[in-house]
Image: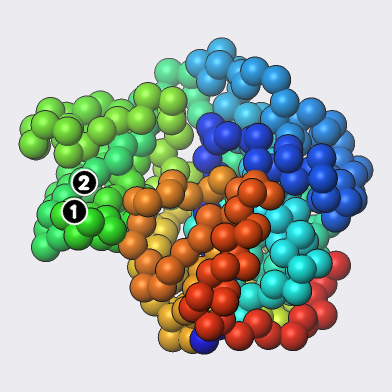
Amino acid sequence: MSLAFIFGTNLLNYDPSGIAAFHATQPAVQRLYEQVSGWTGLDLDTLLRRGPQPDLDQVDIETVSRQGSIALAAAMVGIHDVLAREGVHPASVGGLSLGAMVSSCLAGALPRRELFELLLRMDHVGPRQPDARPEGVAVGFIGTEDDPMLYCEPKREGVYLAGEFGTHPSGAFRTMLLSGYRDALEQLSAEIEVGSVQLQEANTVAVHSPLRQPVADSVARLVAGAAVGEPVLPMCSSLERRTLTTAAEIRDMFGRNAVETIRIDDMSAEMARHGARLGLVLGPSLPKGWIAFPFPVVHVESPADLSEVTAAIFEFGVVLPPRKVLTP
């Protein structure tokens, strides 16, 4: 009966009030944010996403993605540190997209400073020509027995399966993330059942698709020189059902992360294999109530959620492991 920590994706728009409340009340979070500011040069207002957020149509999406990923990674690590001070330690970890990189750090495979410097230096979008074919992202809802590959390459030119998010808790449908060229996504949306493929207007980058190969190349170059070691905790992959155990496997994950499909069911099934009976989703990185896990899950986004964590640990009989010494 163990505990798993889950780290989600790089959401461009999320409610930052919870992590601001953690920062206002928790010295551990304050110390981390001071460190991250020193490592990245980003000020506290940027890291805490204070003030109005930029209009994505009017700004450099590369800069927004870079700053957003650093801010959300800091939120995840900061909440981890709060839980650690309360003696709440995971027996396994895993993440999706940005969360996979964060989980490698909190599994002890990558020093914290190197994680944030990598997020600062890597390409997040990559070069795009002004007259290039516009990109987009859509959320798809399909029957529980439907094949998601019918909606993307090679069946559908220019559409890629970016993410599989499993069966909805209601059991009524499955959710997938599609990305690729916007015109191809629009055509797909128009040709199938109304409402089953919904374009995300604010997202103009074809994440987790071959169109992000320059990003994958950038990450691979940087991580090749990083101080990657073997994880201390079981690190569950979201690229396939597998536990990463070596530095080589961690480096490989970093290189593949930008261009391959993320699959939450593979990750959570591997956590269950390691004995997870409760999961904590750290930070505002996954939508609540949309993903069915093989174990109960508590979202920890603000100090108000800590009481629910304690209650769930007792309710489900979770045995907390002793703290392992991780890379600082």
Against 4, residue 209 (above or below) is above
| Left or right, residue 278 beside residue 81 | left
**In the depicted view, which residue is nearer to us: 276 or 106?**
276
Query: Would you name the residue on which mark 1 appears?
Result: 173
Q: Which mark is residue 102?
A: none
Q: Position of residue 203 (x, y in %)?
A: 43, 30
Q: Earlier in the sequence, mark 1 or mark 2?
A: 2
Place residue 85 in its image quadrant: bottom right
Residue 108 at least partly seen: yes
Place residue 64 in its image quadrant: top right
Name the element at disc 2: strand
Q: Position of residue 80 (x, y in %)?
A: 71, 61
Residue located at (79% from left, 28% from top)? 45
The color scheme shown is rainbow
Residue located at (58% from left, 34% from top)? 15
Which mark is in front, 1 or 2? Answer: 1
Against 323, residue 213 (above or below) is above
Q: Where is residue 187 in the image (x, y as percent from the top left)?
A: 16, 29
| Left or right, residue 164 beside residue 129 | left
Residue located at (44% from left, 46% from top)? 287
Query: Would you name the residue on which mark 2 appears?
Result: 141
For the C terminus, the image quarter is: bottom right
**In the depicted view, which residue is nearer to us: 185 or 56?**
56
| Residue type, numbered disc 2 | Phe
| Residue type, numbered disc 1 | Phe
Residue located at (53% from left, 32% from top)? 13
Place residue 70 in its image quadrant: top right
**In the depicted view, which residue is nearer to us: 282 or 105?**
282
Separation of marks 1 and 2 at Cα, in angstroms: 6 Å
State if disc 2 and disc 1 touch (CB < 8 Å). yes
Residue 213 at least partly seen: no
